[in-house]
Amino acid sequence: MDKATIDPVEPKAQDTADRPFDWFRTMSGKGRRAFLGAFGGYGLDSYDFQVLPLALGAIASYFAISTGEAGLLTTVTLVVSALGGALAGILCDKIGRVRTLQVTVATYTIFTVLCGFAPNFETLLVFRAFQGLGFGGEWAAGAILVAEYAKPKYRGRAVAYVQSAWAVGWGLAVLVYTIVFQVFSEDIAWRVLFWTGAMPALLIIWVRRHVTDTEAVTAKRESAGKQRGSFRAIFRRDLLRTTFFASLLATGVQGGYYTLASWLPTYLKKSRELDVVGTGGYLFILISGAFMGYVSGGILADKLGRKRTMQLFASLSVVFMVCYTQVPDGANTLVMLLGFPLGFCTSAIFSGFGSFLSELYPSEYRGTGQGFTYNFGRALGAVFPTIVGFMASTALGLGGAMIFGAVGYVIAVIALFGLPETAGIELK
C-alpha cells in the first residue's frame, strides 16, 4: 500500500467549535442521501437478524429442538453471512457500492419472509442460511459508501451513526416482538415476526432512485479494470499484516457480541424468569445504552483515535459482560441497571469499525478488504453462540456459559496492537 494512503493527515485548525451534527452538514446532498440509504439498510438488516433471537424460545419449543440446535440457527446465519459479506465486498469494487447495497437488502428481505413459512427445523436452517448472504453484505456496502462521502475529520462519527441504526432496528424488532407475542399464540407468533421482515423492500426502491456512488470512486473503479475486487490483492505482502490483524479483531468483537445478541433474550426469560413484557423492557434498556454507545463511540473514535477507543470499550465489555451474567438470583433490578452500560460498551466498540476498515485499504480494494476481514471475523465469531449453547446444557448453565463471549473482547484488544492508527486520513 502507498504510505500516503495510511499516514494520518493533521487536521486543520478550526476557527469555531464543532457543532453536534457538523458531520452531516458538511456532506453534499448526494452524501446525505447515501447516509440515509445506508442507515435504513443497516437498521432493517438488524431488524431481520434480531427476529431470530427474539423468537428462538418459541421456535425451539415448536420444533422440539435442544439449546445446541437452537444455537446452530444463529451460527449458520453468521457463517453463511461471512461468505455473503466477502462476496459483497468484491461486488462493491466491481459493480459499485449502491448496486451492491440493493442486492444485499433484497436478499435478506426475501429469505427472512420465507423463514416464516418453514415447515420444519431443517428448512428453517436453510432459509436462515440464505438470509445470511444478504445480512453479511449490507454493512460493508453501506459503511464504505458513507465513509467515502464523509469529511476525514468527521468520518468516525458519520459511519458510527450508520452503525447506530443497528440499535434502532433492534429496538423496533423488540417492540414488534412484544406486540406480536401478546396478540398471537407462540405457535404462530414466531412466523408472523418473520413475515414482518418484508419492510426493507420499500427501501430498495428509494435507494435505486436517489443514491449514487461518489464520482471519484466510480471513475477510479472503472479505470482499474479487471484488477479491482481481488481476494489475492489483500493477501499480497504489503497488505497481509493488515488483513490478518483486521480479521482477528473482527473475530473477537463479533464473537463476543453475537454471544450476547443470540442468547440474551433466552437468558432473561429462562434464567431470570421474566415474561415477554419484562424481557422486552430489559432489552430496551440495553438497546438504549447501545444507541448511546454507537454515537459516543464515533465521537471518541475521531477524538482519541480508532485504536484507543476500541481497546477501551473492548476492555470494559469484558467487565460488564461478566458482571451482567453473574448477578445472583433475585437481584433482577441490578440486571436491569447493568443493561445500559453493557449495551453501551459492546456497541461503542463497533463505532470505529466502518471508518477504520475503510481507511486500512486503498479504494480499488476497499470493498474486498473490508468485506473479507469483517466477515471472516463473523464466520469465526459465529462459532461462539453454538459453543455457548452446548456449554449451557452443562452444570455452568446459560449465565455461566455466556462468560465465554468475554474471551472475544480479549482477542480484540490483542489484535489492535498489530494495526496502524488511521484517524484523519484522506480516502482516495
Image (cartoon, rainbow, N blue to C red):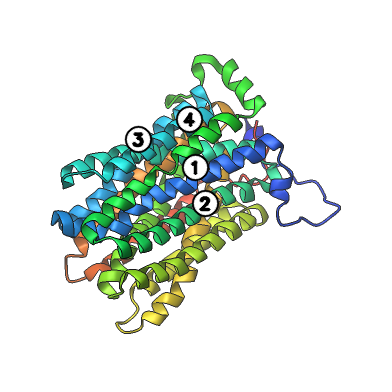
- Return the disc, 3 or 2, that comes first in the chain's sequence: 3
Residue indicated by mark 4: 100
Task: Residue 394: name its quadrant.
Answer: bottom left
Residue indicated by mark 3: 83
Which kind of residue does numbered mark 4 sit on?
Thr
Task: Kindly identify which numbered label has been placed on residue 41.
Answer: 1
The residue lying at 58 percent from left, 36 percent from top is 145
- Return the disc, 3 or 1, that comes first in the chain's sequence: 1
In space, the residues marked 3 and 2 are separated at their CA atoms by 23 Å
Rendered view: 226 above or below 421: above
Q: Residue furthest bottom?
A: 330
Q: Residue furthest left?
A: 64
Crowding at mark 2 (Cα within 10 Å: few <14, some 14-19, many 20+):
many
In space, the residues marked 3 and 4 are separated at their CA atoms by 14 Å
In this rendering, position of residue 359 left or right of residue 243: right
Q: Secondary structure at mark 1?
A: helix
Q: Nearer the viewer, residue 39 or 344?
A: 39
Decide if residue 404 is in sight here: no
Which kind of residue does numbered mark 3 sit on?
Leu
Residue 147: x %, y % from top left = 61, 40
Crowding at mark 1 (Cα within 10 Å: few <14, some 14-19, many 20+):
many
Residue indicated by mark 2: 165
Q: Secondary structure at mark 2?
A: helix
In space, the residues marked 1 and 4 are separated at their CA atoms by 11 Å
- Return the disc, 3 or 4, that comes first in the chain's sequence: 3
The mark closer to the camera, 1 or 4, is 1
Q: Secondary structure at mark 3?
A: helix
The mark closer to the camera, 3 or 1, is 1
